[in-house]
Image (cartoon, helix red, strand yellow):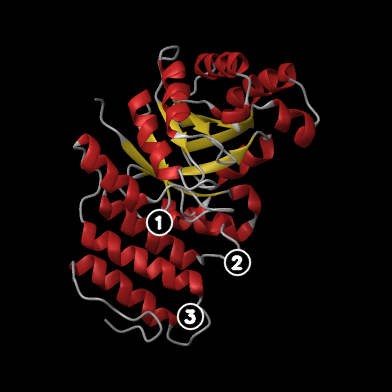
């Protein structure tokens, strides 16, 4: 079985959890922790969202990580320009591929989408850049059109295709089959992005590996919009248990990261005068490999 890689989207899709907003400092700390865990790709955010998001993306890009850092984009020239202005060289461009999204969200046609794909890839693809294409709502797309879109993305220079179960409607059997169908028709890697609306995000992600997916999207604690995404720790444990794959270097650090992110989510210390101490304590714990538990609210370990 081919080697698989984790793509962590806590800082982008995970932040779509209702009520959750990470500060620039929190995003940088989470990215550094993920890097130490061995995550291959970190999706840092959406630069087109504005100045604050651009600051956070730059902070992650400037953190000296081993992991490659992705900037997420809609299929708009201004999105791509914003990402490039931040210094991003790894771009992800998302294209709605289901008729439901094309007709009711964009009011567009399939032919428009294929032309838009060529236009955006011509703008984004260049020497020294890595451009991945996302097939948004792929699980509800017409399979024949999805294959046509995927081949067009590969031809236009995509380094990878992300298959998105945007509304979480797949089961493990369909996940495996859908990825296998594309794997046999493409020469670029397949990435799988699951949502947990029916509680199957982890199972679907593991099944996608059986179909040939080699890049797996995850978030810390399964954070994400609606019911969330596939959990980093659950996917990592599943890969070890069922496929004998080790994708996380240090589970103790992962557990500490999960605890800290969960505390940040509850905002127990975000507005506290001890916030800076808290973040510093978290970073020290991961850097020193300490295995003690700590209290976010007081910033003590």
Rendered position, 289 above or below 16: below
Please tell me whether mark 2 sits on a helix, a strand or a loop.
loop
Q: Position of residue 275 (x, y in %)?
A: 44, 81
In the depicted view, which residue is nearer to us: 253 or 182? 182
The Cα atoms of the two marked residues, 3 and 1, are separated by 18 Å
Q: x%, y% of residue 107?
A: 81, 30
The relative height of residue 259 versus residue 54 in the rendered view (above or below) is below
Residue tagged 1: 220
For disc 2, the marked residue is 19
Where disc 3 sits, the SS reads loop
Task: Say which quarter of the image contains residue 111.
Answer: top right
Q: Which residue does the numbered mark 3 point to in the structure image?
A: 268
| Mark 3 residue crowding within 10 angstroms, few (<14) / some (14–19) / many (20+) | some
**Location of residue 20 by image quarter:** bottom right
Residue at horizontal 48%, vertical 23%?
178
Residue 144 on image: x %, y %? 59, 13
């Amino acid at each position: 079985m081919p080697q698989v890689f984790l793509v962590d989207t806590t800082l982008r899709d995970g932040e779509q959890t209702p009520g959750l907003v990470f500060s620039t400092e929190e995003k940088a700390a989470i990215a550094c922790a993920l890097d130490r865990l061995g995550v291959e790709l970190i999706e840092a955010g959406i630069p087109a969202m504005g100045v604050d998001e651009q600051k956070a993306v730059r902070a992650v890009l400037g953190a000296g990580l081993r992991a490659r850092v992705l900037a997420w984009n809609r299929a708009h020239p201004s999105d791509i320009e914003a990402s490039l202005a931040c210094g991003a060289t790894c771009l992800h461009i998302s294209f709605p591929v289901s008729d439901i999204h094309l007709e009711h969200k964009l009011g567009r046609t399939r032919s428009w989408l294929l032309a838009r794909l060529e236009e955006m890839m011509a703008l984004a693809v260049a020497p020294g850049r890595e451009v991945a294409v996302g097939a948004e709502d792929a699980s509800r797309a017409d399979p024949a059109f999805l294959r046509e879109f995927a081949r067009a993305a590969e031809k236009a220079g995509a380094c990878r295709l992300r298959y998105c179960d945007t509304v979480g409607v797949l089961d493990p059997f369909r996940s495996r089959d859908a990825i296998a169908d594309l794997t046999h028709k493409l020469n670029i890697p397949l990435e799988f992005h699951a949502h947990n609306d029916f509680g199957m995000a982890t199972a679907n992600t593991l099944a996608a590996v059986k179909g040939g997916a080699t890049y797996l999207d995850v978030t810390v604690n399964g954070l994400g919009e609606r019911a969330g995404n596939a959990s980093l720790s659950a996917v990592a444990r599943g890969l070890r248990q069922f496929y004998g794959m080790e994708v996380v270097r240090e589970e103790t650090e992962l557990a500490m990261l999960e605890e800290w992110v969960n505390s940040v989510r509850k905002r127990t210390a975000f507005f506290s005068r001890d916030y800076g101490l808290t973040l510093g304590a978290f970073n020290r714990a991961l850097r020193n490999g300490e295995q003690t538990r700590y209290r976010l609210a007081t910033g003590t370990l």
